[in-house]
Amino acid sequence: MTTMDIWKTFEPDTYYKSFLEKNKRPDGRGLMSVRPITVKVGTITTADGSSTVRVGHTTVICGIKAEIATPVLRNPNQGFIVPNVELYPCCSHMFKIGPPGEKAMATSQFLKNVISSAKVLDLTDLCIVHNKLAWCLYCDVVCINYDGNLYDAALIALMAALQNVKLPAVSYDEENDKASVDIERTLPITLKARPVASTFTVYSDSIQLMDPTAEDETQGSGEVTVVLLENGSLCTTHKPGGQLILPNILDTFVDLAKQRVHAVNTLIGKEINE
């Protein structure tokens, strides 16, 4: 064990602060630098759409399974999209076996809110037969290696997997009230929006960090995620408690997030078109 390792183990706060005083982080990045992102689609052959995304060392897999369901009475011409996030002990010592923890549930809710706020899908496009049949897209997001910034990685994985979805053609025999599925004929779904999330950790009023690692998150006193649409307009923000974010700092976060939107969507688009 090196001297730096000993320092980090026994005095993690002063170790971390020593880097911030030099406007950098222990991983060598600047305070507002982001980690490299890789996107692969179609990585789960048994799913109707899938992706594997890496943001630095954080690795997330998204698999989408389409099932035929009955529309609810209040929305007889709409289908469903159901995101669910799983964090298993194998991805980090922070997570335990058992029911979904707070982080997993919060990330699932975050994805639901973004899908709704951005109107990612027109749910009427998932309707097969009015008041009888509709597609339900179960979107399972599983983190296999956690090193911070799950919100950004999970949303990228979900958006990439949705763009990889192919739904089989369905015909309906009204006389016999039977549906038949033709798996040989498939069609993609049309996305109405492609939101991108950018997460920031607040260390103090004068020090903020973009794309936090797990270490950054533990040292920070607050966190905020800015979600923008393709045109750079604000979709939503998410702040799970912590230190108050001043308006001028939030404006800076939005400006930085705008620089990332095109790059992320271009990366996904390039992978989809290959």
Image (spheres, rainbow, N blue to C red):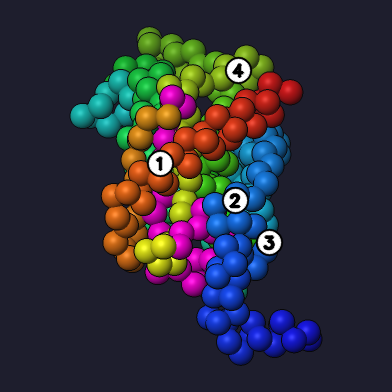
Which type of secondary structure does the marked residue at label 3 adopt?
A: loop
Which type of secondary structure does the marked residue at label 4 adopt?
A: strand
Q: Which residue is mark 3?
A: 28
Q: Residues within 10 Å of mark 4 (few under 14, many from 20)?
A: some
Tag 1: amino acid? Val
Q: Residues within 10 Å of mark 1 (few under 14, many from 20)?
A: many
Q: Are marks 1 and 4 in contact (CB under 8 Å)?
A: no
Measured from the top left, where is residue 175 in percent x and y? 38, 10
Q: Are marks 2 and 3 in contact (CB under 8 Å)?
A: no
Q: Which residue is mark 2?
A: 33
Which type of secondary structure does the marked residue at label 1 adopt?
A: helix
Q: Which residue is mark 1?
A: 254
> Considering depth in this image, is 228 or 17 the residue closer to the camera?
17
Q: Residues within 10 Å of mark 3 (few under 14, many from 20)?
A: few
Determine the residue located farthest toward the right in the rendered image. 1
Tell me the distance, in whole angstroms, between the alpha carbons under discs 1 and 3: 24 Å
Q: Write down the region rendered in magenta.
A: 207-231
Tell me the distance, in whole angstroms, between the alpha carbons under discs 2 and 4: 40 Å
Q: Which mark is residue 227?
A: none
Q: Earlier in the sequence, mark 1 or mark 4?
A: 4
